Amino acid sequence: KLMEANYYSAVYATKAAIGSMVQQQGGRVVFLSSQAGQIGLFGFSAYSASKFALRGMAEALQMEMTPHNVRVTVAFPPDTDTPGFQQELQGKPKETILISETAGLLKPQHVAQTILKDSL
């Protein structure tokens, strides 16, 4: 389920858009990962794996798209106040709660604005 939501959805969307970016010799693909895509996170084995997969695809895709002037950005935000985060809290182990508290909780608008600003 998490691979479908976090990885394959990005694969399908990228496949749909990348051809026209290559044809026009420019563009940017932005993937939204998570801090759990940079380090394994206690209690989130499947989630971290799905975000690591996204990161791996993005790194390879960046190399493949460089000759076509298509850039690839991966964002790794900390906890973001979304419906998914609220659902996640219901089963989050206390060890993981202690880890995530150190980064704070971001608003989705802040994450989006930061990604847009950094991608320009």
Image (cartoon, rainbow, N blue to C red):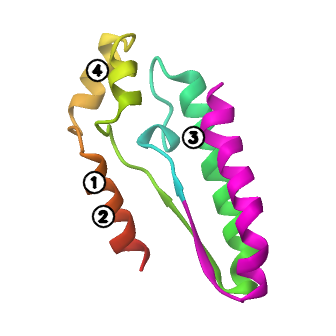
Q: Secondary structure at mark 1?
A: helix
C-alpha gap between disc 3 and disc 4: 19 Å
From the viewer's perspective, is 14 left or right of 116? right
The residue indicated by pointer 1 is: 109
Numbered badge on residue 97: 4
Q: Front-most of 9 and 62?
A: 9
Which of the two labelled residues, at mark 4 and mark 1, occupies the earlier sequence position?
Answer: 4
| Residue stretch in magenta | 1-30
Tell me if residue 58 comes above or below residue 104 in the rendering: below
C-alpha gap between disc 1 and disc 2: 6 Å
From the viewer's perspective, is 65 left or right of 97? right
Which of the two labelled residues, at mark 3 and mark 2, occupies the earlier sequence position?
Answer: 3
**Image point 62% across, 28% down: which residue?**
2
**Image point 28% across, 20% down: which residue?**
97
The residue indicated by pointer 2 is: 113
* Image quarter of residue 105: top left
- Mark 3 touches mark 2? (CB < 8 Å): no
Query: Which kind of residue does numbered mark 1 sit on?
Result: Gln
Tell me if residue 21 comes above or below residue 87 in the rendering: below
* Image quarter of residue 116: bottom left
